[in-house]
Amino acid sequence: MSDITAARAALRQQAVELPSWAFGNSGTRFKVFAQPGVPRSPEEKIADAAQVHRFTGIAPKVALHIPWDRVDDYAKLAEYAGELGIEVGTVNANVFQDDDYRLGSVANPDPRVRRKALDHLLECVDVMDATGSRDLKLWFSDGTNYPGQDDIRARQDRLAEALEAVRDRLGDGQRMLLEYKLFEPAFYTTDVPDWGTAYAHCLKLGDKAQVVVDTGHHAPGTNIEFIVAFLLREGRLGGFDFNSRFYADDDLMVGAADPFQLFRIMHEVVCAGAHEPEAGVAFMLDQCHNIEPKIPGQIRSVMNAQEATAKALLVDAEALAAAQAAGDVLGANAVLMDAYDTDVRPLLAELRGEQGLEPDPMAAYAASGYAERIAAERVGGTQAGWGA
Amino acid sequence: MSDITAARAALRQQAVELPSWAFGNSGTRFKVFAQPGVPRSPEEKIADAAQVHRFTGIAPKVALHIPWDRVDDYAKLAEYAGELGIEVGTVNANVFQDDDYRLGSVANPDPRVRRKALDHLLECVDVMDATGSRDLKLWFSDGTNYPGQDDIRARQDRLAEALEAVRDRLGDGQRMLLEYKLFEPAFYTTDVPDWGTAYAHCLKLGDKAQVVVDTGHHAPGTNIEFIVAFLLREGRLGGFDFNSRFYADDDLMVGAADPFQLFRIMHEVVCAGAHEPEAGVAFMLDQCHNIEPKIPGQIRSVMNAQEATAKALLVDAEALAAAQAAGDVLGANAVLMDAYDTDVRPLLAELRGEQGLEPDPMAAYAASGYAERIAAERVGGTQAGWGA
Amino acid sequence: MSDITAARAALRQQAVELPSWAFGNSGTRFKVFAQPGVPRSPEEKIADAAQVHRFTGIAPKVALHIPWDRVDDYAKLAEYAGELGIEVGTVNANVFQDDDYRLGSVANPDPRVRRKALDHLLECVDVMDATGSRDLKLWFSDGTNYPGQDDIRARQDRLAEALEAVRDRLGDGQRMLLEYKLFEPAFYTTDVPDWGTAYAHCLKLGDKAQVVVDTGHHAPGTNIEFIVAFLLREGRLGGFDFNSRFYADDDLMVGAADPFQLFRIMHEVVCAGAHEPEAGVAFMLDQCHNIEPKIPGQIRSVMNAQEATAKALLVDAEALAAAQAAGDVLGANAVLMDAYDTDVRPLLAELRGEQGLEPDPMAAYAASGYAERIAAERVGGTQAGWGA
Amino acid sequence: MSDITAARAALRQQAVELPSWAFGNSGTRFKVFAQPGVPRSPEEKIADAAQVHRFTGIAPKVALHIPWDRVDDYAKLAEYAGELGIEVGTVNANVFQDDDYRLGSVANPDPRVRRKALDHLLECVDVMDATGSRDLKLWFSDGTNYPGQDDIRARQDRLAEALEAVRDRLGDGQRMLLEYKLFEPAFYTTDVPDWGTAYAHCLKLGDKAQVVVDTGHHAPGTNIEFIVAFLLREGRLGGFDFNSRFYADDDLMVGAADPFQLFRIMHEVVCAGAHEPEAGVAFMLDQCHNIEPKIPGQIRSVMNAQEATAKALLVDAEALAAAQAAGDVLGANAVLMDAYDTDVRPLLAELRGEQGLEPDPMAAYAASGYAERIAAERVGGTQAGWGA
C-alpha cells in the first residue's frame, strides 16, 4: 500500500513556480483581449503572484521575463517580492521580440544580430546575480519558415557557440535550462525542436546545462512521461514548463486538457524521487490566460498540479513493482489507476487547514475582494503584456 | 496522352484571387516584424495587388477584409481597383478582433454580442452590393478553450440562426462561403471545426451557401484532396483559401511545404472540371508573409498555384482511367507522377510571352523598381496589419 | 446540484454491447500472441461474453462478426445466448479478408468484386433476421494506397450504390450503422474517412442509416465529443465503437488512454439524453486485447465506460448552464471537473450490491475459476481470431 | 551553378540496399493479400532482388532478416548472391515474432526472455561473420500498451545491458545500427521511440553504434531532414530505412507520399557529403508492397530515391549559400526549388545508357518476362512472408 504519511510530507514541501507574464495580457495572433486589473509593472505582477501563494501555500516563487520585467534595480525587485512573502525565481531571456530577430537570434546568419542576442543572454545572468536566481531559462524562437532559407547545420554551430558563451558566464550555483519546442513561431525548422537536440547540446555544455520540458511543445502522439523518465535517468532534467494543450502550444491551464497525462508525468517524477527539493527540478508554470481571469487561472493551475502530484504519491509502489515483475498487464495498470481514480481533494483541503489556509483556494480568493480592488485601482497606464 | 492544347487554353483563363491583407504586416503571437514599404491604406494594398497581376497575368482580383479595409466609399474603392486593372473580389467578414468577441461572435452566449456580430456580417453584404462582389467569406473564430466552458449544441443553434439571417440578406448572384478550421484561436472546441460541419450548415442554408477549403485548416494526416473531390461531387465547393503548412495553420506560401499535395488537389479540381470559370470555384490565396517580402511572396505563390495547375492539366486522363479500371496500382500511379515530374516552367514562360508578359515574373518585378519606390514613398502613417 | 437519484436510475439501465471478436486472438501486423483458453467457436465466444455480463450486470448483448462467427443456424445461436442470459446484438459485416478485396470491396473497380461484397452485406441482413438484431454495422476498409490508384469520385458512386441496395433490403426496425475511419488498412485514401462522409451518405439513405463513432478512428487533435454533440443534434448518431488509443487505431481498452476524453464524450451523450435506451444509441465496445487476458480486459472496459457515465451523470447541469450563460469560463469548467474528480467507484459498488452482484467485478471474476477452467478445457481445435 | 559533372559522378556511384522481405508477402493486421510468384525461400528472394539491380544498376545489395531468411549455410547464401551479381548487406535481427516476446524482448521483465532475445542478436552477428556483412540493424518492438504496465526506466536499463553485450560481440569493421520508432506494435510506450533515445544509447556504446533513420517512424509534423542534418553533424547517422507514409508507419514506396520531403532529406545528405560511399551511410529500403507487385514496387522505389538524389545534387550550392548569408528568404528558397522543379528523368535515362542499361527500368522489367516466369514456376510450397 501507498505510504500516506510520506505522501503528506512530500505534499507539504511541494513548490510550484509562477510566471510573471501569466498575470499580464496575452492572446493569439488574432487578438489580445484586455482584462480589468491587469498589472502595469513588474511590481504589480509580483503582487498578483503573491496572492496565488497566499491562497495555495505552494507557490513561493515567481519567474521573471526580461525585458518584459525590466527594472532599474533587480535587487530591489527581489526585496519587494520578499516583503510579499515570495521569491524571485528563474530568469527567462527573451530574444524574439526585436525587429532584428526576424531571421533568428543566436542562430541568425548575421553576426551582428547574434552578438546582440548573446549580449541579452549575458545581461540576464547579471539579473540573476542581482536577484539571487539559480536558473536561466533559454527558449529560442530561432528557425526558418521555408526549405533552403538557411543552413540547418550552420545554425547549430552558431547556437552552440552562444550556449558556450552563456555557460562560461554562469557563476557557482547557477544553471542554464535549455527549452525545446516543435514549432511556432518558426514553421519549417526550429533550431531546438525536440528533447534530443536540447539534450545533445547540454551534454557538451557540461553540468550546468539541463533540459527543460514544456508540456505543450511536442508533436501529436509524443509520450512526454517517457521523455521525463529518460531525462531523469540521465540526470538531465532541469525543470518543467507546465501548461496543457489540445492541439499545438495552446498554453492552457496545466491539467485542463489531459489530467491523466499530468498524473503520468508526475508518476515518473515521483518514481525517480525528483519531486524532492534536493533533486533540483524546477516545477514552473508557463501559461496564457487569454480568456479567463489571470489570478484565478493561476490558482486553479497550481491546484491541478498539486492534485496530480498527490495522486502520483498515492500509487502503491510495492504493488506496482510486483505486478510489473509478474508481467500482470491489467494488474499493474489497475494499481496505477487506483491512485488516479482517488479523489484527493479532501486530503489537500486537510493539508491546507494544517497550514492555516482556507480549504478552497478559489473560493477564498474570490471572497478576498482582491480582484475588485485591483480592477478599481489599476486604472490608467499601460497594461503589461507579451509586448511590454 | 494529355491534351496540351486544352491545357494551354485552361491555363490562359486561370485566375487566382489575392488577399488584401497579405500586403499588410502579419506575424505570430510572439512578434509582428515590420517591413519597409508596407501599405498604409486599402488603396495602397490594392496598388500592390495590381503589381502581382501585372507580372503574373493571372491575379485579376483582390479580396477585402472588413474592417481592415474599411473605407467611406466602397464603390469608389472598386473603381480605383478597376483603374489599376484589377477587380475587388470576395468580401471577408471579421468578427474576432473586438474585445466583445472574447467568448465568440455569432455563437457567443451573450445575445448583445451575437447581434453586434450579425450586424457586421450584414454590413459586409452592403459592401458587396457596393463593390459588386459575388462572395462573402465567413470564418468564425468562435469556440471554447476549456471543457464545460459553453454548451456545444447551443452554440450550433446560435450559429445556425446567424447564418440564416445572412442567407436571407444575400441578393441574386451573391453567395456565402463558410470556412472551417480545426483550431486556433480557440483551443478546445471550434464551432466550425471541419468540412462536415460546414457542409451540414450549407445544406440547410440552400444553394447560396458553399464550403470553402483552407488548405491549412486540417488535422495532421487529413487527405485534403478527398474532401475537395467529395465536395465537388456534392456541388458544395465554393472556393479555396490557398496557403501551405508544415504543422498547424502556418499560412506559408501555397506549394511551399508540400507541392505534391497542391498538385493532387488541383488534379481533383481538374477531374471535376472545376478549374473552368463557369464552375464558380474561387481560387483565393490566404497567406501571411511574416518574414519574406510581401509582393514577391504573392507573386511566387501565384506561380506555385499556376505550376500545380499546369501539371494537373497535363495528366493523361485516358491512360489514368484505363490503368485504374484495370486495377494497375503502379501503372495508375505512374501516369499521375509523370505529370507531376514534368518541368512546366518552360511552358508557363511561353504562355506569359504570348500574353506580352516577361517570362520570369519574380525577376521582372525585382527589376521594376517598385519595391524601392514604395519603400521610399511610404514613410510615415501607420502600416496596415491584422490589427488595423 | 446533480440529481443522484436520477443518476442511479440511469446507471441501472445502462447497457454496453460486447464484441464477440474481443474474446478471440488479435494482434498487430507484426505478431498475434496466442493466449490459453481462447474460444474456438462462436458459442465459446458467447459463453465468455456472458461472463462479462455475469460480473458487471450491464453487458447484456454480444455483437457478431460475419464470417468470423458464421454458423449454420443463427436462430439457434441467438437461443444459446439467451440461455446464458445475454442477447445477440449488432451484426458486423466483414468485406476485407478475402483475396478478392485487395483493391476494395463495394468500391472496387471490378464489378464482380463489388457484387460479391454486396452479396455478403445482404447475407448479413439475413443473419439479422434470424437473430432478431436491430443493427447492421458497416465498416469498409476500402481505399487506396497510392495517389492516382483509383478515382476518388467514382469510388463514392460505387459506395453509394451498395449502400442503397443494403438500405432497400433492411426490414422494419432494422438499421444500418455506417462507420468511418481515417486510415488503415488503406493509407492514401479511405472511402469513408470521416464523420462528414458518413453523415452525407446517411442523409441520402434516409432514416434507417445512422453514423457510428469509433473513438479510435480520428486524426490527432480531433475533438470527438464535438462530433458526438453535432450528430446527436442532427439525430444521426447510431452508436459508438468504444476503445482507446494513444496514436492510431490502437483498439486499447476504452478509458485506458484518456479517461477524461471518455467522460467528455459521455457528458455530451447525457446532455442530449442519449444515454436513455429509447434514444436508440448503441454503446458497443470494439477492442483488441493483444497482450492482456481477454475476459478481464472486457470487464475492465465495461467498468471504465460505466465510471465515465456515472461521472457524466453527476455533472450539476443547472450550475453548469448558469456559469455558461454568465460567461464564467473558470466556473463552468469547475462544475464539469467537480464531477470528473469525483471517485464514483463506491457508488457503483453499491449499485452492484443492489443488483446482487459482487462489488468488485475484476476480483469476483478472478475468484470464479472460469479462466482456469477454460484454459484447461479448451485444448485442441483452432483458436478464434481475426482470420477465422 | 550546380556542378553537373560532379552530380553525374555521384550518381554513378550511388547504391541503394534492398530488403529481402520486400519480395515476400506483407500486409496489415486486417489481411495479407497473396500474390503470384512470391518467393518461397531466401534464395528466391535474392534472385528477385538481383532483378532490381539488373534493371536499375544501383541496387547491388540485399539485406537479410533473421529468422525469416534463416538458412543452414550463410556463406553459401552470400556466394549465391554473388553469382547473381549482388551482395548480402545488412543483417536485421527479429525479436518480435515469438510468443515469448509478448511483453518485449531485451526489455522484457522476465530475464529468461531477455536472454533468449540477446542470444538471437548474437546469433545475427554470427550470420554477419559468415556473410561478410558490415551492419547489424536493431529494431525493437519493445514497449508497453498500458500506463503502469512496466517500469519505463527499468526497461531502459535492460535495453542498455543488451546493447552493450551486442557491442562487445561486434568484430572489427562491424557496426550496430539502432533504429527508433514512435509506436506500433506497442501503443503506450516504445522503448526506443525517437532519435534522441537512440542517439543517447549510441553515445554510450561508442564508435560502433550508429542511429538509423526510418522515414516512416516519426510523429506527425516531425522535420526529418533536421534530424538527418543533426545526426550527420554529430557523426552518428548510420543509415536510412527508406519508405514513405501518409499517416503512420505505412511502409509505402519511398517518395510516393511526399517526394519533396525525400528531396529535402537528400539535400541534407549531399550538404554533408554523406552520399559519398566513404561516409558510411547505408541507404536501405524498408517497405511493404501490400497491394502492388513487389519487384516493380522495388524498382520504382529505387528510381524515386535516385531522382531525389539527382535533384539534390543539382542544387546550386554556391548560390544557395550566398542567398542564405544575405538573409534572402525567397531567393534561398528559390535556389532549392529550382533543383526540385527540374525534371531529372532524362539525365538518369542517359546515365543508364552509359552503363548499358535500358533507359526505362520499369518498362524493361515488364518486357523481360521475369514476372510471368516466376508466377509459372513458383507453384506449391509456402510463400515467404513476415511470419516465415
Image (spheres, coloured by chain):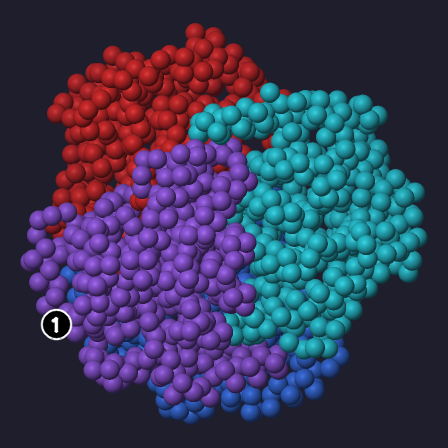
Chain colours: A red, B purple, C cyan, D blue
Residue occupied by mark 1? B367
For image coordinates 72% across by 30% down, the residue present is C10
For image coordinates 63% across by 37% down, the residue present is C272
Determine the image quadrant of residue D338. Answer: bottom left
- Depth check, front residue: B256 or B85: B85
Determine the image quadrant of residue B252. Answer: bottom left
Q: Badge 1, how many Cα within 10 Å: few under 14, some, many 20+?
A: few
Q: Quarter of the image containing the N terminus of chain C? A: top right
- Depth check, front residue: A55 or D72: A55
For image coordinates 60% across by 64% down, the residue present is C191
The picture places residue D147, in percent across and down from the top left corner, at 58, 38
Q: Is residue B291 above or below residue B115?
A: below
- Horizontal arrangement in the rendering, residue B282 relative to residue D84 (left or right): left
Determine the image quadrant of residue D355. Answer: bottom left
The picture places residue A23, in percent across and down from the top left corner, at 31, 27
Q: Is residue B292 above or below residue C58?
A: below
Q: Chain of mark 1?
A: B
For image coordinates 35% across by 45% down, the residue present is B120
